[in-house]
Structure formats: C-alpha cells, structure tokens
C-alpha cells in the first residue's frame, strides 16, 4: 500500500512492515511476520521492483512480530539485516518477554491480533539469523539515508529510524497508533513495553525530529508530525497514571 511518494506499507496495520524506495533501491523497515514474504514480493512487483532491489533491512527492535522474514531475506538474497546490538539476543530468540504486565485488555482486539498473527506465521517464528549492528546517530549508506535514534524502553535496543527523503520517522513499538490489546487508536504508549518509564523518557530523543509521518509497528500511519505524536503519547501516559491504568486514551489518528 502506498502511503506517500517513495513510502509503502505491507501487511495490515495490525502488524506493519515498510518500504522506502529511493534512487531505484529499497530499504525495508521491520520484517513483520513470516508470511509477509509473499506480501513483500507482491508489493515490490506492483511498483515495478523485485527482491534484488532491496539494499537493507532495518529492524526497529528484536521482537518476534518484527523479524518475520529477516532470516530468509538475508539467506536468499544476501540483504544485510541491521539491528541495535542490545536487541540481538532477542532477535535470535535467546530471550523472551515476560508473560505478565500487559495492562488493560479487551477480548475482541486481543483475539483479532492473535488470530492475525497466527494466520501469518506468528506461531512459527525463526531466529533473525546474521545481524549487523547499528548505533545511535548512525546514518546508513542505503536508500533514503536513514538515521538511527536509540530509544530504549520498549526493549533495550529499540530504535527509531528517521528518513528525511520520505519525511518519515519509523518508531517501531516506541509508541503505537493502535493498541492491539484494547483497540484504542491514536498515539499512545505501546503495550508489552519492558521499561515504560524509560520509554517515556526516550521520547525526548525524537520530539524535535522534523517529519510529518510517524510510522509505528502497530497501527495506522500518523501524519500529524512527530512533536504532536509525542505530546499525545505523554498525555496518554499521564492519564493512564492518574487512573492506575497502563492503557491508552482511545484517540483517533489524523
């Protein structure tokens, strides 16, 4: 699906994977679920490209619903897979997130997310395979010249990826615009976050980024700009704290 010039999404906004097309090459941001492999090929074909045009895959973090086709893309096409080293053990499936501490849940959204994930291979996740490290502030020599911003909290190695060429900031699960556990929409803290306080503090690292598009790992694209998205996340976190909840406020994305 085309979001803007040079910017595409594959999959559903329940689980996002993105393509940046610049100078005839492609940078993929996040690998979604394993069966997104066919969706990736179909989207590339639709825009007149192939897997051979992919120059890099950047993982915003190492959670299982972000590494889906990473190993296959590396193995079959030799595409470098880039990840902050603090999440390498997670992407290799050597560590797992705690089962508790999810916060508020509603049966319908949870069932929908689990069904969607299972249908797209979420029960058969493979380790991400060979990984190359990226560091805070690094500008990568790949299509779009993405800049890495370390935003620990959701996981230790979570990063945001600023791509001025497409006026976008990819935020992974640093925030969400659709809470998969409650169905609430609009920018808010993401569920399954290991260190919520640290994640909230890390918002300072992105709030001055000049980008219209905020693209999360879960939820629709937000075109209200980074500063406004950060403001809404903080507001949602404050509201959750005042009510004793870790969920969101249910605002609708622009």
Image (spheres, rainbow, N blue to C red):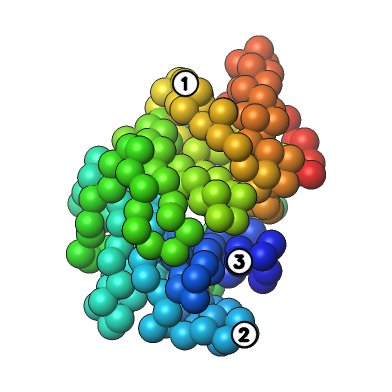
- Mark 2 lies on residue: 46
Residue 48, located in which quarter of the rendered image? bottom right
Look at the picture and state if 102 lies above or below 5.
Answer: above
Residue at 46 percent of width and 42 percent of height: 160
Image-based side of 55 in relation to 160, left or right: left
Look at the picture and state if 106 lies above or below 111.
Answer: above
- The image position of residue 249, as x and y in percent, is 73, 30
Residue 15, located in which quarter of the rendered image? bottom right
- The image position of residue 244, as x and y in percent, is 61, 17
Residue at 28 percent of width and 41 percent of height: 135
Numbered disc 1: secondary structure:
helix
Q: How many marks?
A: 3
Residue 153, located in which quarter of the rendered image? top left
- Mark 3 lies on residue: 6
- Mark 1 lies on residue: 201
Residue at 35 percent of width and 38 percent of height: 137
């Amino acid at each position: 699906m085309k979001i803007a010039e040079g910017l595409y999404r594959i999959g559903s906004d329940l689980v996002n994977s993105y393509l940046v097309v610049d100078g005839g090459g492609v940078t993929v941001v996040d690998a979604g679920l394993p069966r997104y492999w066919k969706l990736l090929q179909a989207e590339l074909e639709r825009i007149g490209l192939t897997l051979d045009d992919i120059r890099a895959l950047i993982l915003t973090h190492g959670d299982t619903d972000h590494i889906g086709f990473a190993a296959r893309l590396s193995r079959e096409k030799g595409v470098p897979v880039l990840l902050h080293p603090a999440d390498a053990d997670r992407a290799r499936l050597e560590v797992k997130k705690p089962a508790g501490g999810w916060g508020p849940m509603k049966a319908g959204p949870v069932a929908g997310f689990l069904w969607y994930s299972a249908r797209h291979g979420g029960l058969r996740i493979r380790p991400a395979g060979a990984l190359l490290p990226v560091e805070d502030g690094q500008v990568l020599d790949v299509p779009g010249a993405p800049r890495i911003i370390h935003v620990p909290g959701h996981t230790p190695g979570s990063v945001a990826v600023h791509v001025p060429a497409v006026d976008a900031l990819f935020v992974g699960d640093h925030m969400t615009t659709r809470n998969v556990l409650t169905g609430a929409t609009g920018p808010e803290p993401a569920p399954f976050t290991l260190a919520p306080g640290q994640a909230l503090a890390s918002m300072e690292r992105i709030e001055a980024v000049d980008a219209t598009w905020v693209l999360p790992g879960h939820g629709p694209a937000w075109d209200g700009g980074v500063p406004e998205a950060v403001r809404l996340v903080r507001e949602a976190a404050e509201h959750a704290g005042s009510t004793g909840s870790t969920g969101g406020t249910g605002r609708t994305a622009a």
